[in-house]
Amino acid sequence: MASESNRSRPPSQRGSGSPGSPASAVTGPVHDSPVAALPRYLDGKPTWGRTTDAVSDALREAILDGALPPSTWLREDEIAAALQVSRTPVREALRRLSDEGLTVKTAHQGTVVAPMSLEDILALYVIRENLEGLAARLAALRPTPELIGRLDAVQAEMAKAAKRPNVERLAKQNIEFHRLIREAAGNHYLDRFLAQAEQAVRRLPPTTFARPGRPASAIEEHDAIVRAIQQGDPDAAEAAAKQHMRSAREIRLAVLLNT
């Protein structure tokens, strides 16, 4: 976090960098702030004309990873100094993330990582249950051997990860499983909405795959979805996907409430 003296000053006086100034002109230590972790999310030096994209991607991944927890203050000068860029692409990146619902701009105070209440989490799973159900239904209307093969391959990787166990690998393969289904649905609006819901779920630490027994039950639930899609049964696919999301919600709540 920024020092007390820096927090007590108005935003216009925090750091000396102007909106278009280079990061070297930005003052103020960032080593004690969560934004100090940002450089590892920057995929190399941004190419000309893509600085805003690179900064947006770095901030997004840091938020989704939990490196920038909910309610963390995101100050332009600190971010610019950490990433060695000017404040202009940082300001645009924060605007993009606000549009995505990952940050919140507060009047006269600045930008924070969007918090997530228990009510937000419950609302998220209600939406995701129905969207995942629809994606599975649409995928079952147009099953292909290639899709089934790729889903089975992900399932096999998850089974391997569950034996170790490797919860990080499980979580990544789970994301891939749901990505394949939503893309197979062939509806770009649904794809976009589900991707946003998935981003929100990634912000909820820790992963539910750390819960004893969850890897095995999730793989079993996935298998029911795959088999329904393979058989071209949209009703069964939708029902299996919705049940999977309900189970995920119950596990998530148990993890959050330590029950």
Image (cartoon, rainbow, N blue to C red):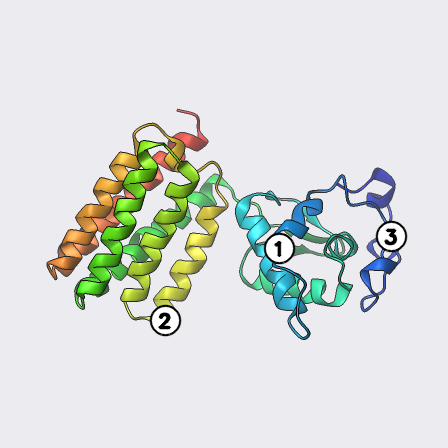
- For residue 75, which numbered disc appears in the image? none
Q: Which residue is mark 2?
A: 188
Q: Give the residue drawn at x 68%, y 63%.
A: 45
Which of pointers 3 and 2 lies earlier in the amino acid sequence? 3
Viewer-side label of 2, 1: 1
Q: Indicate the position of residue 125 as horizontal and vertical percent values.
A: 37, 47
Tell which of 108 and 28 is nearer to you: 28
- Label 3: how many residues lie within 10 Å, few (<14), some (14-19) or many (20+)? some
Could you tell me how far apart the alpha carbons at marks 3 and 1 are, in whole angstroms? 20 Å
Q: Which residue is mark 3?
A: 27
Extreme residue in the bottom direction: 49
In which quarter of the view is residue 160 placed?
Answer: top left
- Label 1: how many residues lie within 10 Å, few (<14), some (14-19) or many (20+)? many
Q: Give the residue drawn at x 47%, y 47%.
A: 202
Left or right of 178? Residue 255 is right
Q: Give the residue drawn at x 53%, y 61%.
A: 100
Left or right of 53? Residue 85 is right
Position of residue 134 relative to residue 220, above or below, is below
Q: Amino acid at mark 2?
A: His
Q: Indicate the position of residue 167 as horizontal and vertical percent values.
A: 40, 37
Mark 1: secondary structure: helix
Mark 2: secondary structure: helix
Regarding residue 160, the answer to whether it shows in the image is yes
Mark 3: secondary structure: loop
Q: Amino acid at mark 1?
A: Leu
Q: Quadrant of the N terminus?
A: top right
Which of pointers 2 and 1 lies earlier in the amino acid sequence? 1
- Label 2: how many residues lie within 10 Å, few (<14), some (14-19) or many (20+)? few
Q: Which residue is mark 1?
A: 59
Regarding residue 247, the answer to whether it shows in the image is no
Tell which of 204 and 253 is nearer to you: 204
